[in-house]
Image (cartoon, rainbow, N blue to C red):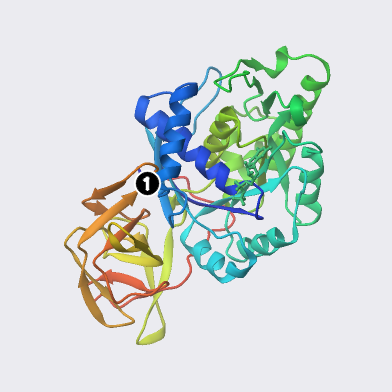
Amino acid sequence: MLERTRNIGIAAHIDAGKTTLTERILFYTGMIHKIGEVHDGAATTDWMEQERERGITITSAAVTTEWWQRAEEGTVKLFPEQKQRINIIDTPGHVDFTAEVERSLRVLDGAIVVFDAVAGVQPQTETVWRQANKYHVPRLVFVNKMDRTGADFDNVVAEVKEKLGANAVRILIPIGAEDQLIGQIDVVNQKAVYFSDDDKFGSTYSVRELEGELKQIGEAAYEELVAAVTDIDEQLGEKFLLEEPFTLEELKQGIRRATIANKLIPVAGGSAFKNKGVQYLLDAVIDYLPSPLDIPAAVGMDPENEDHEIVVPTSDNEKFVSLAFKLWADKFVGKLVFFRVYSGVVKKGDTVYNPRTRRSERVGRLIRIQSNQHTDIDACYAGDIAAMVGIKNVTTGDTLAAEKHDVVLEPPTFPDPVISMA
Ligand code: GDP
C-alpha cells in the first residue's frame, strides 16, 4: 500500500480554486470508491450537498481518499491497479499562515500548486513556492479555471518558468479555453480527451488521429517533454543520446525521477469543474509525486545530545516515531492529534512517549478522516497519516514515539538526484 500512498498538500493563492479542487477530488474518488465508477448527474450533486452540510471533509487537517486507478487503452500505469491512497494535508493559503504552511510542508511528500488561469502567478504563491523549494518538496502545477474569460494557459506556464524559475513542462494541455474549453491533451500518453456536455467521461482519441493545429501542439509538447526529461535524467538521457528507443513506462519513470529530484515541474491545465481533468491530475499525483518510500529516512536527534543524529527509516519494522503536525477540536470526537508516522507502527491502545514532556500517554482511538466519514482504524503504519484521540499533553510539532525512545524529529530531507525505485 505504501508504494501507492501519497501524502500531498494543495497550495494556492486565495480564490484560485483549492477548495473546489479538494472537494472535487474527494467527490470523484469517493464516488469511485463507493460505487466502483463515476456516477452521473443527480446522485453526485446530492452527495456533494450532504458533504457540505456535514462540513467535515475539506475543513479537516488531513483527509484520506482511496480509489482504484484505471488504465485506459494505450496508456501505462506505473503502479499496479490496486487501491491508491492520497492523504491530502491542509496547507492554509492565507499569507498570515506562512509558518503553518512551512510546518505542513515537512509532513507532506509532494504538493499540487494551483494557479488561476486568468490571474497567473500571484505574489503570495511565490512565498509558498520558495518554502517548497527550501524543503525540496516535489510539485505539480495545476492551472485551474481554464473556462474563465481571459484564461491563458501558456501565459501561466511562462510565468511559472520566469517568475518562479521552475523547469515547467506541460503534461496536460487544455483544448480550447473560456466557454470553449472542450478537452485536454494528455501529452505523455499522446491522447486527446474531449469532455462531454454532461461532464461524464468524454471521448478519447490518439493525438495521431487529430487534425491540424491540435496534432501539432500535442506532438510538439511531447518532444519538448522528452527533451526536458532526457536533459535531466541520466538513465533516459543516455538512451536518448544513443538514439535507443524507450518505452512509455520508461519515460514516465524518468518524469517521476526528475520530479522527485525537484528538477522538473509537470504542469496540467484545466478546470476543477471537469471530472475528467481531475482524474488525470490524480493519475499524475500517483505517477510523478513521491511515495513515502521515496524518502529513505527522516533524521531525528537525541534530545539529550543534539549532535547525535538518529536515522528514522520508513519501515514498519522499526521503533515507532511520528510527528504531531496539527491539533484539531472535533465536536463529536474531542481533541484530534493529526500525526504522520515516519517509522514503525502505532496501534490503538498503545502508549506513546513525548520526548519534550517526557510523558507517556495512551492512544484511545486511531481515526482516519475520509471524505464522507471518520473511520476507526486499529493501526497506522510507516509513511501514513491519521489522527489520535486521547493524547492531551501535546503541541504541534512534537515528536510522538515508542515508549522511552528518545528521539526528536528534524524535517525530512529529499534524496537528490537519483531516487531508488524499490
Ligand atoms: P480557494 O480560495 O482557493 O479555496 O478557492 P475556491 O475553491 O473557494 O474557489 C474560488 C471561486 O472560484 C469559487 O467561486 C469557485 O466556484 C470558483 N472556481 C473554482 N474552480 C473553478 C474553475 O475551474 N472554473 C471557474 N470558472 N471557477 C472556478
Furthest-bottom residue in view?
304
**Can residue 81 be seen in the rendering of this structure?**
no
Measuring 71% from the left and 41% from the top, which residue is drawn there?
169
- In the picture, which quadrant includes the N terminus? top left
Residue 36 percent coordinates (x, y) = 38, 24
Residue 338 percent coordinates (x, y) = 37, 61
**Disc 1 on helix, strand or loop?**
helix
Measuring 72% from the left and 36% from the top, which residue is drawn there?
146
Mark 1, residue position: 2
Q: Is residue 149 left or right of residue 196?
A: right
Considering only vertical position in the picture, is 5 above or below 31?
A: below
Measuring 62% from the left and 18% from the top, which residue is drawn there?
196
Disc 1 marks a residue whose amino acid type is Leu
Considering only vertical position in the picture, is 126 above or below 141?
A: below
Snapshot quadrant of residue 5: top left
Q: Is residue 26 left or right of residue 368?
A: right
Furthest-front residue in view?
53
Measuring 38% from the left and 87% from the top, which residue is drawn there?
305
**Can residue 383 be seen in the rendering of this structure?**
yes
Residue 87 percent coordinates (x, y) = 43, 49
Which quadrant contains ligand 1?
top right
Residue 415 percent coordinates (x, y) = 53, 58
- In the picture, which quadrant includes the C terminus? top left
Considering only vertical position in the picture, is 421 above or below 350?
A: above
Total number of numbered labels?
A: 1
- The residue nearer to you, when weighing 260 against 134, is 134
Q: Is residue 157 left or right of residue 141?
A: right
- The residue nearer to you, when weighing 324 against 51, is 51
Considering only vertical position in the picture, is 51 above or below 42?
A: below
